[in-house]
Amino acid sequence: MTKLTGLSDSYSNPIKIGNKIKITNEINHELHGAWVVYEVIQKGLTPVVSYLYSEKGQIFPEGHSAGPLCNEYDLEQFVFEKDISKIKPTNEIVVVE
């Protein structure tokens, strides 16, 4: 059974544990290019994005970079919105797999 994170991508597609998601890259363009693909994993109860590869290839080993999925959203909305599936990420996120 696939677990829903409760969050959606930029196009209202639900994000699930195990999904691969492409996130627009806002820093290190010379290193990664315009986007990075992460796998959504779960650490305890927390959905985490774990690095897979970027537009310029696999720069780091898989999993070398990671962070909570909620960091990709406005944290005030995340905390106070009753239905977090309605909030949109701060940068474009697309479920790719």
Image (spheres, rainbow, N blue to C red):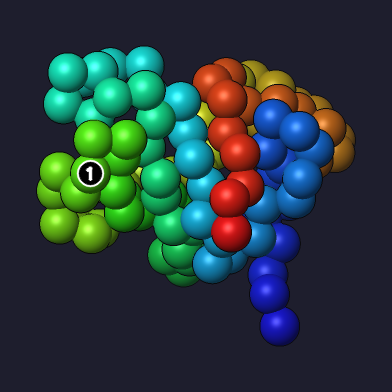
Residue 78: tell me if it is visible.
yes
- The percent position of residue 16, horizontal first and vertical second, equals 65, 60
Check disc 1 and report the residue beneath it: 57
Residue 77's place in the image compared with 50, above or below, is above
92 vs 33, nearest the viewer: 33
In the rendered image, the quadrant that contains the N terminus is bottom right
In which image quadrant can residue 63 be found? bottom left
Q: Amino acid at mark 1?
A: Gly
- In the image, 37: left or right of 27? right
Residue in the picture at 72% in, 41% down: 8
Label 1 environment density (alpha carbons within 10 Å; few <14, some 14–19, many ≥20): few
Residue in the picture at 51% in, 55% down: 20
- The percent position of residue 62, horizontal first and vertical second, equals 23, 59
**Which residue of the protein is positioned furthest toward the front in this rendering?**
56
Residue in the picture at 59% in, 59% down: 97
13 vs 3, nearest the viewer: 13
